[in-house]
Image (cartoon, rainbow, N blue to C red):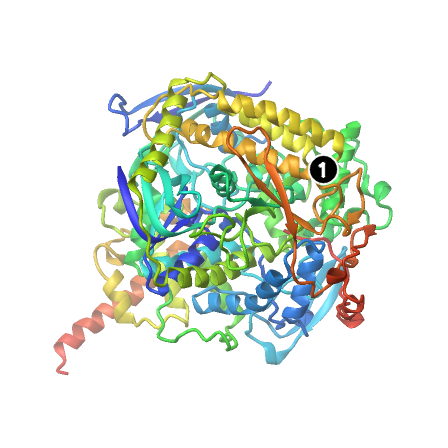
Amino acid sequence: MDTFYTDLLCIGAGLAGERVAVEAASRGFDSICLSIVPPRRSHSSAAQGGMQAALGNACMGEGDCPDVHFADTVKGSDWGCDQEVARLFAETAPIAVREMAHWGIPWNRVVPGTGTFYKGGKEYQKIEKKEKEGFITARDFGGTAKWRTCYTSDGTGHTLLFTMDNQVVKLGVKVHDRVEAVALIHDGQRCFGAVARCLKTGKLRVYLAKATLVATGGYGRLYRETTNAVICDGSGAILALKTGIVPVGNPEAVQFHPTGIVPTSILVTEGCRGDGGTLKDVDGKRFMDTYEPEKQELASRDVVSRWMTHHIREGKGVKSPYGDHLWLDIRHLGERHIKTKLREVDEICREFLGVDPVTQMIPVRPAQHYSMGGVRTNRDGAAYGLDGLFSAGEGACWDMHGLNRLGGNSLAETIVAGRIVGEKVADYLDGCEVTFKTELVRDFVRQEEEIISRLMAGKDGRENVYDVRNAMQDVMMDYVGIFRNATDLRHAVVQLQEIHERAKKVGLRSSSPGANPELALGMRIKGMVRLALCVAYAAEQRTESRGAHAREDYPERNDRDWLKRTLATWKEGDDLPTLNFEPNSQVWEIPPGQRGYGVSKIIPSEDPSVVGNGEASKAQEVPEVCKTPETPETN
Amino acid sequence: MGRQLKFNIFRYNPEDPKSVPHMESFDLEETEAMTLYIALNRLREEQDPSLQFDFMCRAGICGSCAMMINGRPDLACHTKTKNLPDEINLMPLPVFKLIGDLSVDSGTWFRAMNEKVQSWVHTDKPFDPNAEEEPMDNQLAEEIYELERCVECGCCVAACGKANMREDFMGAAAFNRIARFMMDPRDERTGTEYFEVVGNEEGIFGCLGLLGCEDVCPKEIPLQDQLGMLRRKMGWQSIRHLFSRLLPD
């Protein structure tokens, strides 16, 4: 058995994982990153839009500061976040962006003079100041009071990831790519590393570490339609559930995006609708003007997604071999506009669909987009339940997003949390000594060997792993999606429990040694269904609507009963997760109030430590002069 | 009814002593807007679960899925079957070590490349968390980004006559990376330092100028320009070297 020993084991080598490893390595600690793909192919690379940081260089971002960014983040979370974490995040983001510039990011810069921009199909003018020339500029994203999203053209995630991995190479951090962690090694008190499987040779390995970090990204692939990469299957949350101790925070907090293309659900930006694109049905008719006469296509991300789903259910979808969809029509914006202002959309349509958006409509439907939930940690990134275990990025529930994440805050979180948690991990490693028990390691390895041999031999049954996965994804999409209600969620939980039984009976059809992609999924499938059950069951329990969690039967945000975070654990042998709850924030710098977008009725909190004397919320109102015309959220 | 497509796919599992390299054929009915991403996943799920290939983002961003498609290296995720004939031949990329079937170990290759060209900004300036960023002209930032767009898919290496003949040849992706850092004022490396890395037969002087790299780059990076620039600059550097040896200190 190959055994590797290191100070820090990072499971996941996307932006968050690598940023933590870089911090630990620059403090002199040995680090190994595990990644199921070469690190530069991690899903971080797919984030195109940008990262939020209150630099205030662009003229439309003038007067911006961490206070305003903090307020936007709290409102975006629908008061579901941890406000201490959101504060820490907003304060650190500008430093993190500049540090990335120091390491080589070619951030777009301020160009002085007059320029134009589009909002709601109208053209506006802006004048950039001469004294800001060459400083890092920003673009507009939804849900923010200021233009705050720093970017490198349409490839921000890509440049960040390449630049971060350059630091990894520079510092000599080892990356073991195509290695998948399959179980955390722990004694119920402390984490000692992980058992992993090499996806080149198929062999098991052991990694022993003083500190272990889970930075594995989101769980979009629990859903049939998702904008996430094919590897985003929640493996970090699954590792946590497998311990029976470490909780997954707010699993029900799942964000959807209205316009994934059909098939493949690649995201096209909401800028299409911002610029005047319209949604049409099977009859070539618009429908958003009927459902939302005022905002129409420009209603918020969740609202549009919900009405699209509703309209498809009404039989107004367009039939296709990949299921029903609707049309996004941007033809009337004209060739010049599409080829310049919406270049990226034009490219995606032509490259992946063979559709020319200048003359043809684009097939779209809503898709899962982001997982706010994840491995629950404290503000230092230390996971609940096991000493020596940390988590960061989308895979973690740190929790700065609460029940809804703002566009541009996901990339920012990876870099910022990576920086902060990296420091804490290095502090933890300072003087840390561990005793590894060989019998404990042996037991964990044997468990995985047993799982593999049972799957290969079909000892537990002959269920087809792809059928089981598809059944789970269908249930999640159809009953735990954008519209949620007690009937659907109950149905989903019952169905998923049956699928959980089927997942236990999976047997492989192929017995080829080596990587064996069917075995990789076979080893993951039970954990995926359990995580899906966490999402569905927690969504059923949360009897309110907050952020991305929208209950048709409980349309109001219930601050009286639900200023809480779900903590889901799984006891072996159970067929449901155990749910506990904790207050979602200890500090209430901004007491719960109206977000200023979306329609929401609120049942107010009666807790004086939360609402204070009621004056603070007024002080946080954004002054009238700072308000910009409303745009829908972009990716 | 869609077209009946015939896929001839290279099969070999180096981990299986019984496996021998061969081509295997699969039939699949074409559906609307089908890409090789959709087709290969259907083949794996419906016909042969042991079939190995790599996809990650399936959106042309991550560079995972490069393979030889009817003899030409390209990303499978953005290759539409409607632009291909009824019979489609799929082979793994050459040059890179085979993992199995269509999957190759590009991660190890590119990590070694990044180490070799020291793919990071070389600077003695420490980062000051309290200072404003150094200004940069936006035009320059966009020019750097243009070269930074490389996704390390390996198509250029697979299409390179020299890389196919000589294992230690650095390849266009490496030259493009060096060109990117030469353009970046934050990198303090001198011409001599770049010359030590790339001014040799493994490097730019080994390039045969066949430009297969430029033809196949799925991100349409202007590789020809970078190779030309690098050859000129390194050429001058080598003349300087020669002179400095002839001239007394």
Q: Is residue B146 above or below residue B21?
A: below
Report the side of A239 relative to B174 (left or right).
right
Query: What's the residue at 33%, 36% (across, down)?
Result: A200
> What type is the residue that disc 1 sits on?
Trp
Q: Alpha-carbon neighbours of circle 1 within 10 Å: few (<14), some, or many (≥20)?
A: many
Q: Is residue A14 in view from this perspective?
A: yes
Q: Nearer the viewer, residue A570 or A71?
A: A570
Which quadrant of the figure contains the N terminus of chain A? top left
Q: Is residue B95 left or right of residue A466?
A: left
Q: Return the x and y of residue A356 as percentages of the image width and height.
A: 63, 41
| Placement of A516 over or under A117, stated as above or below | above
Which of these two is toward me, A499 or B201?
A: A499
Q: For residue A360, what is the image quadrant?
A: top right
- Looking at the image, residue A371 sits to the left or right of residue B113; the answer is right
Q: Which residue is the site of mark 1? A: A327
Instruction: Tell me the element at label 1.
Output: strand
Residue A22 spot, x, y in % from top left:
39, 60
Residue B30 visible in the shown view: no
Instruction: Identify which residue, A257 or A135, lies in the foreground.
Output: A257
Q: Residue at x 73, y 60 (%)?
A: A610
Horizontal and vertical percent position of residue B47: 46, 19
Rendered position, A261 above or below A466: below
